[in-house]
Structures are given as C-alpha cells and as structure tokens.
Amino acid sequence: MQYHRDLLETILERPDLDANQCDANGLTALMIAVGSGWVDGTERLLLGRPDVRTDIQTPDGHTAADFARLVKDPEDREIILELLGHDDDEDLDSDAELEERLTAALRQESRVNYIDKMGEYLSGLQV
C-alpha cells in the first residue's frame, strides 16, 4: 500500500507527470486511490489535478467508480462516489468475481515502475 501512496504523492507533486497513465495492471492513480478507500488522495487528485479523468477504463472496461464499490466504509464510499460525480452505487456492477479481480489488481505492486517509466520518457524529451 505504501507504494501506491508514494506513487500518488509523486503525481500530486509533479504536474509534468501524466496523472492518467495506467500501470501494468491497467490502473490509473485515481483508480488506486478510490479502490484503496483513500478519500483524501481521491479528493486531492480530482481537485489538485484538473487533468485527471474519471472515465478511463481498465482493460476489462471498469472505471474508478467501479473501484468505489470496494470501499467498505459506507461514509467513505459515499464521499468518493460524490467526488466522482455519482449519486450512489446502485448503478455499479456487484459481481463478486469482479470485486475479487479488482482487489487483486490493487494489491499487486506494478510490474512497471510508473515513476521510472515517466522519468525515462521525460529525460528523452530534454535536449
């Protein structure tokens, strides 16, 4: 989990990084913050980075709103859904297999270090 928080902090601190970049699992920083139930991180991403998109889908076709259903605390889930522009979680998929896949993806540390990947890209652009 610390890896994910470090990643999010870096994205928040570095506007030159693409906040919508997906990791090797197809997850964006927003999906990670939402699925982890990190209300403050979700809010900071959405309010602090106007370029963050809520409509990006994983390879399986799931958005950050689908990850909100993983949040066990009902108050946190409600706040996150509101931040994402959803009134409630009634329209979200409730498939147990989906929940298992999303949870597993969140537990994995990315096989591609996002920060290193972006650093290589940015240094390639410098003259």
Image (tube, rainbow, N blue to C red):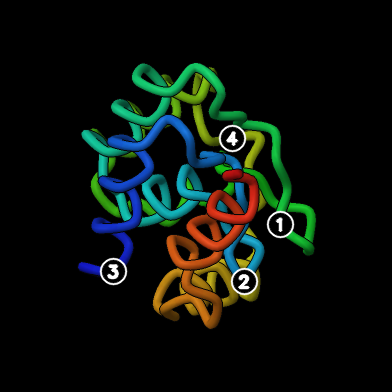
As helix, strand or loop, the secondary structure at mark 2 comes to: loop
As helix, strand or loop, the secondary structure at mark 4 comes to: loop
Q: Position of residue 35 (x, y in %)?
A: 42, 54
Query: What number is the disc on residue 10?
Result: none
Query: Real-space Cα distance between discs 4 and 2?
Result: 26 Å
- Residue sitting at x 31%, y 26%: 43
Query: Real-space Cα distance between discs 1 and 4?
Result: 20 Å
- Residue sitting at x 65%, y 44%: 63
Query: What number is the disc on residue 25?
Result: 2
Q: Mark 4 or mark 3, which has the lower sequence index?
A: 3
Query: What number is the disc on residue 3?
Result: 3
How packed mark 1 is, by other alpha carbons closer than 10 Å (few <14, some 14-19, many 20 or more), is some
Task: Indicate the quadrant where residue 96 lies.
Answer: bottom right
Q: Which residue is mark 4?
A: 90
Q: Position of residue 20 (x, y in %)?
A: 59, 41
Relative to 50, is 74 on the left or the right? left
As helix, strand or loop, the secondary structure at mark 3 comes to: helix
Relative to 110, is 124 on the left or the right? right
- Residue sitting at x 73%, y 48%: 57
Q: Are marks 2 and 1 in contact (CB under 8 Å)?
A: yes
Nearer the camera: disc 1 or disc 4: 1
Q: Which residue is mark 1?
A: 58
Task: Inspect the image, locate mark 1, and give the three-letter code of the amino acid beneath it.
Answer: Thr
Query: Real-space Cα distance between discs 1 and 3?
Result: 20 Å
- Quarter of the image with the N terminus is bottom left
- Residue sitting at x 78%, y 54%: 61
Q: Is residue 17 above or below residue 4?
A: above
Q: Are marks 2 and 3 in contact (CB under 8 Å)?
A: no
As helix, strand or loop, the secondary structure at mark 1 comes to: loop
Q: Position of residue 21 (x, y in %)?
A: 61, 49
Q: Is residue 17 above or below residue 94?
A: above
Task: Inspect the image, locate mark 3, and give the three-letter code of the amino acid beneath it.
Answer: Tyr
